[in-house]
Every structure is written in structure tokens, then in C-alpha cells.
Amino acid sequence: MNFEAVTIKDIARELGISASAVSKALKDSHEISAKTKLLVLDCARRLNYQPNPMAQSLKRGNSKSIGIVVASLDNQFFPQVMNGIESVAYSRGYNLIITQTHESFELEVQNVRHLTNRAIDGLLISVSTETDAIDHLKSLHQKGLPIVFFDRVSDEIDTHKVIADNFKGAYEATQHLIQSGYKNIAHITSSPNISITKERLKGYTLALQQNNIQPNEAYIKYCLHGGKDQQEIENALTELLQQPNRPDAIFTASDRITTTILLLLHKLKLAIPQDMALIGFTNTPLADVINPSLSTVYQPGFEMGKKATEMLIDLIESKRPVTEFETAVLPTQVFIRDSSQQKKKL
């Protein structure tokens, strides 16, 4: 059974008047009598008539809709970003169309195509871990579609971007492990081609170097699907545990990787932090109640969504071409809990 929306023609047929008269009555035109307007409005309510937003957008030249592309809403970080986006968009009269890539480049391209077919006014996007080319976004930007990147960004398009201070968060997390007595610190991260991976790797590496610890390539493991594939994470951890000089701490660089590593260490019956210390990027609200409590690097997801949406709407509503763009860098916070406690000397 197919659902068919009620149209102006249905109201016209019901009342035995022209579709043009119905349209004018709904617009409160002076050409239509008060009696006819009342009849039309009453019939519209009775039939549950809703205006077609796509038709209206074509007439106005805008849709008051924003397209959103994120990796996955089961990641603790992105729902917080969405709350920030909603806090601005709805108050400024915009609707949201949300899509998920599930870390697939192909799905990202399909989602962007779908959104632009819906006549969106602008696009908010955090690229997938598989994305290493953005021709699908370049062509739209060249045609004038306002685009704002957040979290995972690209430097190939000159536009506004909103990111967390990934470098500083990673640097401070690694520095904390070193100061707590850990020297063999591994790093499990996402795909090497995305911006957040590069920024967090730089912070991790610099903290080691400044403490006269030579970065060990065997301690750096990439999960190409950003933690979506649990087997990738298991393989990374297994390879680390099989090292002749096994790491004594792990710094993880994404929400899914952090929580999965915690689960795997428990399954292997490795005591945390006695056998392996752990700190990582994650916005899970359960960090305090997990046993042991989880040391984390927290990203300001809500603020990121809020800022990105403000920037996008300003682009959409600008009366003149915008030629100067900003990369907003929002601060991260490192929360020290039991999983990275001071290493006990033997």
C-alpha cells in the first residue's frame, strides 16, 4: 500500500472549485472571498493537507534544509555533534537531513548525491575513513553549494572548518602516560589518510621525542575502518602483545577503538593499568563508571556542531560572496582516571 500525500488538487476536487482558487485561498489572497477561504482551510485540516516543501523551495530559491554527513550515530561523539547542530538549525528555521557513511567512501558519495537531489541549501560533512579524494565535494563547491567541514576535514576546499585540538589532546595524553612512568607506549589509530589521524599522531610523536623516547613504528597500528571492524582492532592489539618488548601502555585515537580495546583487555584478563595502561579519545559518558574508570581525551562535540552550523547558515544567508574562511579549533580536555594510574616500580 503506497502512501500518497494530499495535494491542492484533492482539496479542489473535494470542494468542486479550481486548484488555482485553492492555492490562492491557502495564501490568504485578496482575490478569494472570506467564505471560500474558510471552506478551503477547513477541508485542508480535515484531509490533513501539508504543503510540499520541495515545491515551495523551488519557488523561493531555497529549501531551508541542511544536509549532514557523519560516519555513524552509534559513535558517542557524533550524537553530541548532532545536538549542537540542532540547537542552532531549528532556532534559525532550518530542517535537517541526516545521513551516515558507516566509514564507506562509496556510501559517502551516494549520500551527498542524495542530499543535493533534495535541494539542500548547504552541507555539513565529516568525511569517512575511506575518503582520500573529494572530487564529489569539489564539484558541488564550485557550483556554489555552501559546505562546512567538521571533525574530519579536507584542505582541498577553501571553506570554513571546525575541529578539535587533536594535536594538543594527543600530546597531553601521551605526556601523562610518560609522567606516570610508562615508556613503551603504543598508539592504535584510524586510517592514515584522514585529518584527525595525522594530527593525533603528531601529538603522540612529539610527546615521545621531547622525553627522549624514540617513536617505534612497530608500536603504531592503523585501523583502516576507524574501529568499525572489530577484527582490525583485535589484530592490532594481538600484534602489539606479541612484540618482543611488549608495550606497557596504549594511547587510542578514536571513540570505538578506545572502548573496544578496553573490552578486549578485559577478555584477555589483562589487569588495567598493572598489565597495560590505557588512555584514549572517547566521549562515552560511562568513563567514570567503567571498572577501572577510563582515562579519556574528550572532544567538545556539542560546541563543534553548534559552531559548524552557525558558520554554514552564515554562508547560506550571506548577501555577498564569502572569500575569507576560518578554521575554528576547539579545545580538548584530558580526564585522568584509574586506567592510566602511576606505574608501580618493581
Image (cartoon, grey):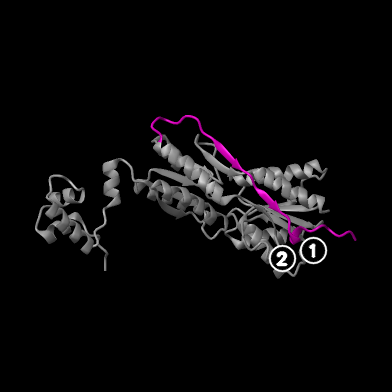
Q: Is residue 291 above or below residue 298?
A: below
12 or 193: nearer the eye?
12
Q: Position of residue 232 (x, y in %)?
A: 63, 59
Q: Is residue 216 above or below residue 260?
A: above
- Residue at coordinates 74% horizontally, 49% vertically from top-left? 174
> Which residue lies under the disc numbered 1?
275
Q: Main secondary structure of the magenta part?
A: loop
* Mark 1 residue type: Asp
Local crowd at mark 1 within 10 Å, few (<14), some, or many (≥20)? few
Q: Is residue 116 left or right of residue 161?
A: left
Tell me, yes or no, whether the two marked residues, 1 and 2, touch with CB atoms within 8 Å: yes
C-alpha span from label 1 to label 2: 9 Å
Label 1 sits on a secondary structure element that is loop
Count the marks. 2
* Mark 2 residue type: Leu
Q: Is residue 65 left or right of residue 263?
A: left
Q: Position of residue 261 (x, y in %)?
A: 68, 61
264 or 37: nearer the eye?
37
Q: Which numbered tag is attached to residue 265? A: 2
Boundaries of the magenta span? 318-346
As drawn, the residue found furthest toward the left would be 16
Q: Position of residue 133 (x, y in %)?
A: 51, 42
- Residue at coordinates 76% horizontally, 58% vertically from top-left? 340
Of labels 1 and 2, earlier in sequence is: 2
As drawn, the residue found furthest toward the front would be 34
- Residue at coordinates 60% horizontally, 53% vertically from top-left? 224
The N terminus - image quarter:
bottom left
As drawn, the residue found furthest toward the right would be 346
